[in-house]
Image (spheres, rainbow, N blue to C red):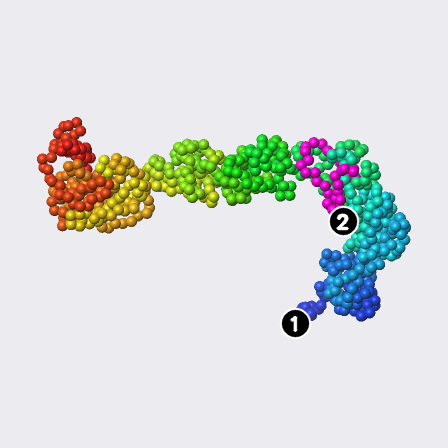
Amino acid sequence: MKNIYKFLTLIIACMLTVNLSATYYIVGDGTDDPNGKWCNGTNWEFLALDENNSITFYGVAAGKNYGFKITNAADWSHDQYTTFDYDNSDAPLYGGNGGDMGFRLTEDADVTVSFVDGKVRLRATKPLAYRSNYYYIAGDKSAMGSWSENAVVLTDDQITFSNLAAEWYEFKITNGTWDKTWGYSELDVAKSSPMHKTYGEGNNICFRLQAAADVTVKMENGKVVLLIDREYCVTGIGGWDAVTGYTLTQANNYTYTFYNLSSGDYRFKVKEKVGNAWHDDCTWGYDHLDTENSNTGGDWDGDSHNVGFHLNTPHDVTIALVNNKICLNVTPVYFVAGNGNGGAWLNGVTGWNPSAAVNRLDPETNCITYSGIPAGTYEFKVVKGAWGEGNEWAAGNVELETSSKGYQGNGTNNIKFDLQQSTNVTITFNPETEKISLVSSHGYFLSNVYSVTGVEALTGANWSATATDTELTPKGDGTYELIMRNKDLSVGNYDYKIIGGHSWGDGCEYPTSNAQVSIPEAGTYTIIFTLNPVEGTQSNAVYKQQDVTISAYGYSTFYSDKAWTLPDGLTATIFTQVNGTALVGESIDLIPANTGVLLSGTANDTYTLLQTTTDVTYSNNLFRGTTSAETIADNGKVHYILGTKSGECGLYWPSGTDQGVGAFENKAGKAYLEIEPSAAPAGAPGFILRGKDVVTAVEDLPVNEDAEYYDLLGRKVTHPQPGNLYICNGKKVLLF
């Protein structure tokens, strides 16, 4: 077993060290090289290419013509390869296509030959050159040597016959003998001028001249190229006159395009543009229509063989002679049609004209730009040449990702946009996706009006686009705002969005999908909607609200377990200490939760407080309060509530207490002062508030035990009650 293992190991080791023999070989005329380097000086002997199918010969001599072939075996009985890979070789080269491949050096150089994908590549460290006398033209006319195989040479591989007479011609290219020729099968049709009849007997290349013309014949990459300096024309569209027909020349790649050709029936031929004479050899009709590379065309005229076609709407029509055949392609024409106002918009065209040439989209880019459109409201559609089903594209075709924000419209409606300043607008249409791109030079469109629309419980009308009571107000900084007050809402989420121009349309809806207002608990709310149309963003802020009414004297107290913001015109004050005979007050910016305050504002006015999550704490505040009506138990401290005495509004001892000490009733949401007995001014029943400002000085009010109170009908009241209005000492008094 051990010996067998050693034997197998030896065999594998030997296999790994064996070099595979080369598959391809080069053979050539090496003895022609005076340096003895080309093909290593061998004459048509087989030299193996390396493992990369390549070989390099160093110092090959200049000035000599070298021929060679590639084989796949070291004998002549197997395949031979004689096709150049022209795209990956140093040009120029000659020969091949069955015969020997050849080249010539202008200077001594290293030459590398490679075999890749069935073709031969030739690279040199110095440029290659043609044999100056390798190709000859032989033809049926004396100018071409009258079929002499080597009488007329192609200098630098080409020859030009100037002013060649009107006649019928046939020719071939030779290598100086009839052993190797190039005829119609080697004609590079794509690079050559059109010729109706392209070959005759014996694979000859044929052409007819109806008038004298310059003719050039040349060899390129082993192919014949025939260039005839003449014009061709489209006859039939616009008349059959060849002289005034539409011209196809080598300069325009033998192509002519009829732009915006109107709807109708058409028929045509292509012919050489010389007078009005017709020659079959210089005329192309239906029998030369390249149906595979044309998208329309048919023979409508029986034996006349005209190419016919029909247009339902305006199209661009391109007619070309390619590979000696007619290519006919029609392309739809797209226009912008809209509410033109005679100015920069729609280039002054009015009346929704669907085929105005000045509003035609560029045929290459399918776009158009309108510069300096003034402020205003504009509408349009993209139309394929005429109104009709399937010929127009509207708001439902706008591409959101490539369009500026702010346009309006939906479905089959017109595309609409508002401009608040002069703007450039570019419109692009993609026929493949049928999508429209609408771009403002400012990057956005601004509507003249924005409004909130949504569910009825939130907006008052169910998804109304036309409601005006939910319009936003411009804030002057490019943003818009709507403050919606006194909304009684239950717990839940309420859908809405902001739209522009009282019109539905994805380009002017913020957001595109619905947004929501979230209500955490039932109550009355103020909701603030904001919109930035330039950035395309919107938001909402939800505030639970509470109304407070200021008394006839300009003051009220307030207490809540929530924090609240203060509206304009309303001031909140806390009191932090008693300084001798004075209260020390401090104005605050918001009402914190669980904090009693004194509110001052316009007498009898109602103010709306907005709940906020922002909160602070004032630990030294002398105010206390309750959220519901409660009896404040006697805790030995001195208390004061808002009220009046002798017509003066102030903070006074509650009735039924012993100089502010003792139990008393506090109303829901009201605040009261609580002061240590040692700090309370002795014998002073309260603190007077005069005017809009808090007067903190303590003033001794005479205690009038004999004061008499009367109701507004003049009846005496034995036990006056807080919250009622009485007449006392000839003045109206509101008791708190």
Front position among marks 2 and 1 = 2
Q: How far apart are marks 2 and 1 (CA)?
A: 67 Å
In magenta segment, residue 269: yes
For the point 19% across and 46% down, the residue is 696
What residue did someone put label 1 on?
A: 6
Q: Where is residue 176 shown, x and y percent of the image?
A: 87, 57
Residue 462 visible, this orientation: no
Q: Is residue 305 above or below residue 675?
A: above
Q: Where is residue 558 shown, x and y percent of the image?
A: 25, 41
Q: Where is residue 171 shown, x and y percent of the image?
A: 86, 49
In the orientation shown, which residue stands out farthest toward the left? 706
Q: In which quarter of the image is residue 317?
A: top right
Q: Is residue 302 above or below residue 528?
A: above
Q: In which quarter of the image is residue 315?
A: top right
Q: In this view, does 357 lie to the left or right of 28?
A: left
Which residue type does callout 2 highlight? Lys
User: Label 1: how many residues lie within 10 Å, few (<14), some (14-19) or many (20+)?
Assistant: few
Q: What stretch is highlighted in magenta?
A: 242-271
Secondary structure state at the residue bearing disc 1:
helix
What residue did someone put label 2 on?
A: 191
Q: Where is residue 407 shown, x and y percent of the image?
A: 51, 39
Between 415 and 186, the residue placed more toward the observer is 415
Q: What is the number of the mark on residue 307?
A: none
